Amino acid sequence: MLRPLPKHVTAMLIGAMLLGAVGALVARHFYGWPIVPDEDSCPIERPGPADVIMLGDSLVEGHCWKADHPELVVLNRGRAANTTTDVYNRLDELLVRHPKVIVLLVGANDIDRGWTVPEIAAEYRKVVAKLAPVARLVLVTVPPCSHPNCSAEEKSRIVPLNREIARIAQANNARLIDLYGAIATPDGEMPHALSFDGLHLNAAGYAKWNELLAPVWPRPPSER
C-alpha cells in the first residue's frame, strides 16, 4: 500500500504548482504571449478548405477570429514570438488547407531580434513569394509599440519596415492594410485605449483591426 506523502512535501508540491501557474500568467502578460479572454469559448476549428488563414505572430494569435466569422472556415495560425523566418518554415502545413485568403502580420519579433530592415524585408519577400500564387494575400503593417521593452532604436525601424511591406504588397498585387497608420498616435505610439501592454492589442484594438479587414473577408456561404 502506498503511504501518503508527508504534509510538508504535499505543501511544497502544491506551492510549486501554484508558482508555476502564476509564472505562466506573468510570462504570458509581460513577455509577449497573448492573453485571449475567450480562449476557452473559441469555436472548434472546422475542417476542410480554409476561407481565411490569419498568419503571423502573437498579435494574430491573440484573438478568436473564428467567433467573428462563424459562417467561414477561419484558421488562426498566429504563433507567439514568430519571426518572418519562423512563418516561412511552417508554410507547407498551411497551404494544404487551400486557403482563399491569407492575412499576414509579422515583423515585430524580427525587429526585437535586432534584424535590420533590409534583412527583414528579404525574409518577408520569401514568405510572400510562396503565398501569393496560391491565395488572395493581405499584408498588414506592423503596429506601433509603447511597451517598456521597445527601445527608441527598435521603434525607429517600424515605419521603414512598413514602407517595405507596402512595396512588397504593390509588387505582388496584394492588398495592404495599414494598421500602423490607422492606430498610431501622432508621436508614433500605441494608443493606451487599444492595448493592454503597449504592444499587444486589447478588445478595442482588435475591433479596430477588424474594421480595416472587413472589405477583404470572403462572403459567407449564405450570401454566395
Image (spheres, helix red, strand yellow):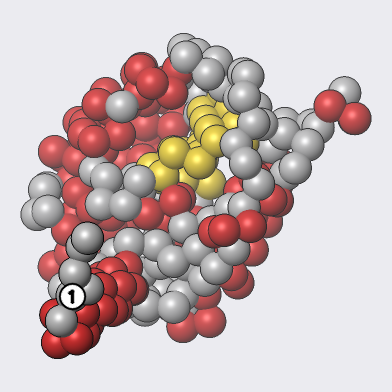
Residue 41 found in image quarter: bottom right
Q: Give the percent coordinates (x, y) of residue 152.
A: 17, 74
Residue at image coords 18%, 75%: 5
Kind of residue sitting beneath label 1: Leu
Residue at image coords 40%, 62%: 34
Element class at badge 1: loop
Q: Nearer the viewer, residue 25 or 164?
A: 25
Q: Give the percent coordinates (x, y) of residue 135.
A: 54, 19
**Which residue does the numbered mark 1 point to in the structure image?**
5
Q: Give the percent coordinates (x, y) of residue 21.
A: 30, 73
Q: Is residue 198 visible?
A: yes
Residue 209 found in image quarter: bottom right
State which quarter of the image contains the C terminus: top right
Residue at image coords 61%, 48%: 65
Q: Position of 66 compared to 36: left or right? A: right
Q: Position of 198 compared to 175: left or right? A: left
In the rendered view, tell whether residue 89 sits above or below residue 4.
Answer: above
Residue at image coords 16%, 39%: 118
In the rendered view, tell whether residue 73 sits above or below residue 49.
Answer: below
